[in-house]
Image: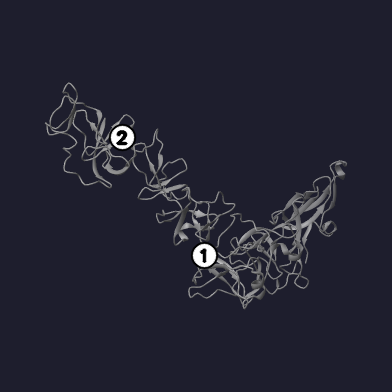
Amino acid sequence: MKKKSIVSQAGLLAVSALFLWAFPSTAHAEGWDNSSGEWRYLDSANNAVSDAWRKSGDAWYYLGDDGNMVKDSIVTIGDNSYYLDVNGAMAANRWIQTKDDDDNEGWFFFGPDGKAYKGKDGRVYAREINGKKYLFDEDGVMQTGFFDAEGNAVEDENPFKTAVYYFGDDGAMLQDQWLLYSQVGENPGYSELAQRNYSEYDEMWLYFGSNGRKYVASSTDRSKQREINGKDYLFDENGVMIPQLSLRSANIRATSSNAKVKYGSLDTDGEQKDDYWTFTVPNEVMSQDDYDTQEHSWFRTKKNGDVIKDKIATVLGRRYAFDEIGRMQTGFVVMLEDGTFGIKYDVDEWNKEDFLTDATNSPIAAIDRGNLYLFGTDELNDGSMVTGEVTVSLRDQNVVFGFRDNGKAIGAKCTLAKSNDKFYYNGLRLDADGDLKYGILRDTRTGHGEYVVVDANGKQVKGQKILKDGEGNWIIVDNSKFVARVADGDRPRKKNGRFYHYDSTAERNDRWGAEITFATDGANNLDSDFVLFDR
């Protein structure tokens, strides 16, 4: 039997004036005895009983190894632990606070049979007490903090990421409750679904459902949406509530807009917000059509509560486009020279060829009168400005567009532009056909207009090369310029700085053929699938 002293106990009743009524002082052949000043239980031979339970009235008492009644202590008998109060009575359905061998305080709970609730074989033990769930380790100590699905404590720098359950300072499991997480480490990490660092958040909120499990997205493919107290909230892959506008999917690939999907406003309290996103329907003065069809749009307010409109604005480190009434825009957006909103298009509204048409014949209105941008293509997704290279699903095929760091399309306003040895026109990267492997384009940025060769990733072939394309033709590049594309059986040869046809099957003195030049060979093989751009 192990005995542990008690520092304090929860809900301890006032000590009664001894309890002589329970233990008469007159010695009997078998019964209670207090002649030594300590309560003992004597057997029929008048010997003190030790390491045993005895009952008096409705209460149970324990006699220690010295035969004296144990008081104000926790005793361990076999695998079970019990608490004996200051009168020696076994506690039942009671919380007790004590210190362990390292002088750390802990709480225990003793059930209706007096046994402490505790785990076994290294596993924790969950029990419901007065309608709340608590967790106890194998020593019976009540647990607090974050735990994973197997009941293991999560104690790393940012436990909110992998934790499934949370037990508060009072030990109770959070159920149908919010938790404001404030213990953010030096590097709390990044949310793929929110597309933000957690360090950008003013507050981080977690929510635990009725079963105590944290609401969390199962992957970065889709955020988790839940209604809580009549309001809708989104949670990311780590269970952190996403502040309003965010990615529904962390996939950066631009796809066709699904803005026609209707979602009700997340703002149900009617409170005017500053520096705030709201998803709502414009009134009839702002847009009669949207009002009649109940078309929702995202709006952003400034610090004074006014709606941001007719410009590109930075919000939480990201840039967004807003039209003349303040609706956030998605897809392709043309902003006019004065920085005001021009027009927007869904990405699947156009074919690849539409972006290659000259300014006079282009079907894309205003593309030659302003700067072309691309914003997140789903207004229920992210909506922020895209920079760098991105694959876009046009109406007829997937292509790559390039945007500068300021968001402007490379080669905007129907001009040919070059960046990182790649060519762009209205943002469209000029790539060779994947099966052909190579293609040519006329570099019209200067007055010479010479042809150059690019590969399937749009990269210019430089220097002096003899390449074989996907159809078995030979492509000759000299001084980084296209010379010719020939269908010879043998690889052309170079001699004295010039290229020649070569026939390995001919007599030795007849193997070298005519010289290969652009004038004689190059202009004859400019079929449409090989020429990417020619004006």
- Disc 2 to disc 1, how far (Cα)? 57 Å
Mark number displayed over residue 317: 1
Q: Is residue 423 left or right of residue 309?
A: right
Q: Quadrant of the C terminus?
A: bottom right
- The residue shown at (48%, 73%) is 303
Front position in the image: 379 or 342? 379
Q: Amino acid at mark 2?
A: Ser
Identity of the residue furthest to the top in this view: 45
Instruction: Check the image and report above or below for 48 versus 348.
Output: above
Q: Is residue 102 left or right of residue 277?
A: left
Residue 533 visible to the viewer: yes
- The residue shown at (19%, 22%) is 44
Mark number displayed over residue 35: none
Residue 519's x, y, as percent? Answer: 83, 60
Instruction: Check the image and report above or below for 360 versus 140.
Output: below
Residue 104's x, y, as percent? Answer: 28, 43
Residue 282's x, y, as percent? Answer: 60, 73
| Callout 2–callout 1 Cβ contact below 8 Å | no
* Circle 2 Cα neighbour tier, 10 Å, few/some/many (<14 / 14–19 / ≥20): many
Q: Amino acid at mark 1?
A: Gly
Of the residues under marks 2 and 1, which one precedes in the sequence? 2
Nearer to us of marks 2 and 1 is 2
Q: Is residue 184 left or right of residue 323?
A: left
Tell me the SS state at disc 1: loop
Quarter of image, res 357: bottom right
Judging by the rendered image, the residue that carries numbered circle 2 is 81
